Amino acid sequence: MASLIAGGVDCDLHPAVPHLTSLLPYLNDYWRDQVTTRGMVDLVSQSYPQNSPITTRPDWRPESGKPGESLEDMQRHVLDPFQFTHAICNPLYGVQMVFSEDLQAAFCRALNDWLAKEWLDRDPRLRGSIVIPTQSIDKAVAEIERCAPDRRFVQVLMLVMGDTPLGKRALWPIYEAAERLGLPIGIHAGSAYHNPPTSVGWGSYHIEDYVGQAQAFQTQLTSLIVEGVFAKYPRLKMVMLESGVSWISPYLWRLHKFWRGVRMETPWVDRAPLEIVRSNIRFSLQPFDAPPDQATLIRLFDHMQSDELVLFSTDYPHWQFDGQDALPEGLTPDLVRKIMIDNPHATYPRLT
Amino acid sequence: MNIQFRESTEAASPLTVKTAIADCDIHPARATRTELYPYLAKRWQHHLEVYGVHAYQGMMEGPPYPKAQPNASRRDAYPPEGGPQGSSLSFMQKQLLDPNNVQLGVLNPLNTGQGIRNHELSAALCSAVNDWQIDKWTSKDKRLKASIVVGNEDGLSAAAEIRERAGDRNFVQVLLLSRNVEPLGQRRYWPIYQAAEEAGLPVGVHAFGFGGNPITPSGWPSYYIEEMVGHSQCQQSALASLVLEGVFERFPKLKMVMIEAGFGWAPSLAWRLDKVWRRLRSEVPHVKRPPSEYIREQVWWTTQPMEDPERREDLFDVINWIGWDRLLFATDYPHWDYDEPSRVLPAGVSEANREAFYLGNAKKLYGIS
């Protein structure tokens, strides 16, 4: 195994909201009453069923409660042994599934306040992502602006499968705010389930949804690039979280070929897609989706023609690797340093 | 790619002997709107005139995303006698088959009866297209072989169409499209796979189609390029569904061909499937082996549109991971993103691999001596 080094940044961890009632202290009287009067249930997304093997490593599974709900467990399982300086918390609580923009905005606000108080306040290594109510662009921007003065919030978090492709112009005020405030946009695996979870319809299985995340990321990259998001916001960084990485190069070869063929359709795309990805898009390491042989790994990283694309992540508490083997076999010490330290700091300006 | 300033293929000397190739994705078109009517019952002719085809999309005709060129086809491919690109056998012979020494050309008709909400009409149109392929194409040029198009959403009538054509050597495969009402592994499509396996015919899954689902899992995008690139994501999800529903386990002699959706993504998808299957296999106990094994044994890939790395030799890594014995050369004639046979492979390929890529794999798969 490649050797981990101290002082790294974990760019994708998932603290769990124990239950919807955990957010009640962060809701106003009206919404607290709505939750209790209407008997609203816990917002658990079927992206990560609590007992699914992928939702947590067997040795990280708590005796009771949700995987990832205990700070002490997170410290003991990853923060201490991996010797991180920073770890970025991306809550995957199912607020994106809510259709009402008012209810969603109240839940996002509560979730962000909960994260600050119950996690960021309790461990100085932790950083957070701002979860936004995308049913309303105005409310999403307002939530970004409300949270941004707290410099421990280092990015804005969205799901890879929502109501519309992420490049759509209606969403651009979110990107304008993020760029202005020095916040990358993190795009995480998962769906609001407002559309079928594959582009050929609803599959039968949880495993199918999970495999399909990679295809969802591919379609979103196409949308973000060809709509011109990075021509309009050239300083904006986007991070694909829990996306997989082995598909990146072949996907870009295809996009690049078609862009050369039909670029007259999107004349505002002022640089080749390959260049845009190299300057503006990053990918988290786990789940690392290549076979465990060094020769293949070397070819895959060589195909990327850049050592700046990948950011270290454990994807805690999801089960992506065993023991301390978060880094795939065969990375050079230079690349390990780039992935664990340099690339995250270059991506997240608020990590200080 | 359709490069407008390319030398005209008509100028190529007929005396130049090129290496024989198979072209595993040729799109024959109808010269007139009513060209299928001789093969359709009066009832359906009347139905089409009054109601049209009623597809899983909004527009009565034409694609939801305007193509880059008329009919998504090369501007130099209009037949001299008129009609759309790909509608004339004599011009196809002159422009594609003769100059490129095509020994085997597999016809994949699009705009047939597939992706139509009225399933009876769908079956009637598909059957008509199958008759038309024989009359207009394969009976007139022995290099051409047809694909059995089937009403994709009604597995039983589709299977009946396959059984009716089984044994007819005009046909070398069954043709489906990647985008259907449900992912292709779903049970409603199994009668198609069963009939194809029984008939000893590969099932080709061509990119495109309509099943009413947005072409991203996050809704409808804006541009044609998103649809074009998106076909490879559709194909990936369709193939994942086939593996995870156990289609390859249930039909072990079934062969499938992924057509016009690229192949660069294949190794990554197989690795991802294997990794996740190791974690979640208790959910899919009917998938008995690592997914990559089914893919390696039962799936073939047509080449066009070849992924185009900046360093072209990077493609060799991908082909080595897939296997040189699994690629089938295709031009996609007459579409605009046509791959030119003489230019697709970088230098440095062994003679055996080159022969397999251009001809041998296709002849073996399709049973052509």
Image (cartoon, rainbow, N blue to C red):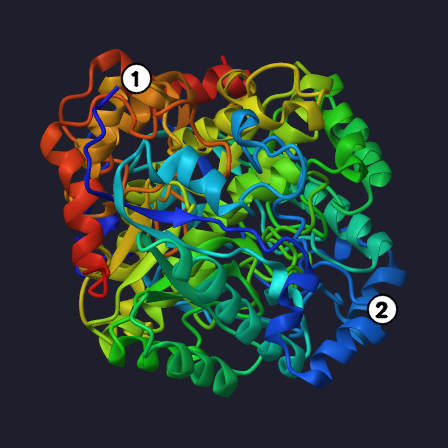
| Residue B329 picture quarter | top left
Q: Residue B205 or A246: which is nearer the viewer?
A: A246
* Image quadrant containing the C terminus of chain A: bottom left
Instruction: Report the chain holding disc 2.
Output: B
Asked whether, in this view, residue A130 is left or right of residue B355, the answer is right
- A315 vs B291, nearest the viewer: A315
Residue at disc 1, secondary structure: loop
- For the residue labelled by badge 2, is the local secondary structure a helix, a strand or a loop? helix
- Which image quarter holds the N terminus of chain A? top left
Left or right, B245 with reference to B351: right
Q: Which residue is mark 1?
A: A293
Distance from the alpha carbon under mark 1 to that under mark 2: 62 Å
Q: Which residue is mark 2?
A: B46
Q: Residue at x 45, y 85 (%)?
A: A142
Seen from this angle, which residue lies furthest left?
A334
Residue at 58% from the left image edge and 53% from the top image edge: A199
- Is label 1 or label 2 in front? 1
Q: In the image, what residue type sits under mark 2?
A: His
- Identify which residue is drawn at 23% across, 57% down: B3
Mark 1: few, some, or many residues within 10 Å (few <14, many ≥20)?
Answer: few
Query: Between residues A291 and B52, which one lies in front from this camera angle?
Result: A291
Q: Position of residue B353 (x, y in %)?
A: 28, 16
Relative to residue B131, is residue B233 drawn left or right?
left
Q: Nearer the viewer, residue A235 or A215?
A: A235
